[in-house]
Image (spheres, grey):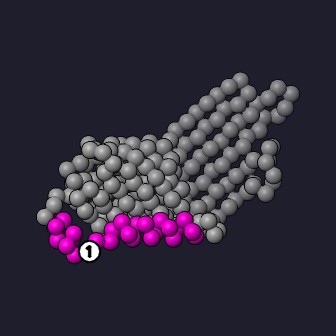
Amino acid sequence: MKTVLSAFIILFSCSGALFAQNESSMESMEGTQYTYNKYYNTIGSEASMLTGYGIMYKRRLSENLHFKITVLPYFHETESTSDVLVTIGGQLQIDVVQYQYMRGYLLFGGAYHYDKTYYTYINQPPYDNHDIGFSVGTGFGAETRLYKQLSIHGEISYGFYRTDRNFSNYLSSSTNGYERTLSFGVGLGIGFMF
């Protein structure tokens, strides 16, 4: 818990310093065009505790409103196992700060996570291990241009996480069952704007 709190304080301090501007620099930025306004789409990859991980697509809906979806489908099958993993998440972003090459936004989002492995070994009854859950929450994020149309973003969120786990065959029974948690999370991503 101390580590999460420390990370939150550090990221909050950094984001505060990132958006802190003196009056002269604010006056010089008033006439500048917000670079992100000419791009309506972004595609890339993301890993987020709130909205999942995988391929990310973001669409600008208006000057201050964006919608992002993150998806990762995975299927693998062998003679004795079949593994299915699906993560899908969505996020609504409302810009609160815009500069020429950076924007800060409030976010509201959630995700659904489905991970199930079926085992069918010879001389054993079939069984499965699963990790199924969802998350919903809110937070703050910042996005900046890395190079030309390449952007990076980072997010801090606070949300509700619910998980149903069954790993009784190779982990301790303490990881089985339902888990409900309110917790901080972080997310990072990279994308190409077009």
The question of residue 11 being in magenta is answered with yes
> Residue 68 appears at what percent x and percent y?
38, 52
Whether 123 is drawn above or below 162: the answer is above
In the picture, the quarter occupied by the N terminus is bottom right
In the picture, the quarter occupied by the C terminus is top left
Picture residue at 29% right of the left edge, 67% below the top: 97
- In the image shown, does 70 or 31 lie closer to the viewer? 31
What secondary structure is found at the residue carrying circle 1? loop
Give the magenta part as a residue range: 5-29
Query: Which amino acid type is marked by label 1?
Result: Asn
Q: Identify the image quadrant of residue 106.
A: bottom left
> Residue 133 appears at what percent x and percent y?
60, 54
Picture residue at 61% right of the left edge, 60% below the top: 162
Q: Which residue does the numbered mark 1 point to in the structure image? A: 22
> Residue 118 appears at what percent x and percent y?
70, 36
Give the side of residue 162 with respect to residue 176, left or right. Answer: left
Does residue 138 appear anywhere in the picture?
Answer: no
Which residue occupies the extreme right position in the image? 123
Q: Main secondary structure of the magenta part?
A: helix
Picture residue at 17% right of the left edge, 71% below the top: 27
Picture residue at 39% right of the left edge, 71% below the top: 16
Which residue occupies the extreme left position in the image? 31
Whether 145 is drawn above or below 127: the answer is below
- Mark 1 surroundings within 10 Å by alpha-carbon count, few (fewer than 14), some (14 through 19), many (20 or more): few
Does residue 145 appear anywhere in the picture?
Answer: yes
The question of residue 43 being in magenta is answered with no
Q: Identify the image quadrant of residue 139.
A: bottom left
